[in-house]
Amino acid sequence: MDNLFKKLGAALEILGENWWPESEDGAFEPLSKCRSPREAAYVLGVAYYIEKEIGIRVILRGGAAFEQTGVWFVEPRWKGIGVPSHLLIVPHYGDRHGRPHDFGIFYGDEAYDDEGVERPRWKLAYSLNILDKGGALRIAGRYESVNVAQSDARTWFRWIVAAERV
């Protein structure tokens, strides 16, 4: 746990912001799978982007898709985008063919178990690979893939938002 706190502290330094997302207990444990603070900063950067750039409050919770743990962005409620209401980012996602990705990005719909507990049905929307230290990314989506020459941990998610507006 100590290493996770160090990683999160370093990730916040990378973001360069005096900010912390609202979260439930255990929400950040999946970030222990991140190989570096930079990878953790990319996940925290999504919460930052949604809150600061889109203006929607985010609550983070631990979640899992296909037995792979991730950070669940509970009901981000996108403005003007037809995206499902739940987002899950799984660090070091292994796809069904066994290929590793730095992140799997899942969308979930409103679903509840027999006891009334919220359990979204997750569907893979994008896989993401960080290609180099300069922030080059490869984002593979449902309809197309894109290489992003340079990205910032705080703003890379705008590429996903832009893809959803198409």
Image (spheres, rainbow, N blue to C red):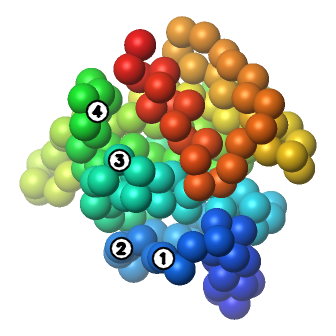
In the picture, measured across the screen, residue 107 lies left or right of residue 127, that is left
What's the distance in space between the residues labelled 4 and 3, CA to CA? Answer: 16 Å
Choose the circle earlier in sequence order: 4 or 1: 1
The reply, left or right, for residue 7 in relation to residue 71 is right
Q: Which residue, given by chain and number where applicable, does mark 4 sit on?
A: 84
Q: Can you identify the residue that label 3 sits on? A: 54
Residue 164: % across, % down: 41, 22
Residues at discs 3 and 1 in contact (Cβ within 8 Å) = no
Q: Earlier in the sequence, mark 2 or mark 4?
A: 2
Residue 22 tag number:
2
Q: Secondary structure at mark 1?
A: loop
Q: Quadrant of residue 9?
A: bottom right
Dots 2 and 1: beta carbons under 8 Å?
no
Which quarter shows the C terminus?
top left
Which amino acid does the dot numbered 3 rest on?
A: Ile
Which residue does the numbered mark 1 point to in the structure image? 19
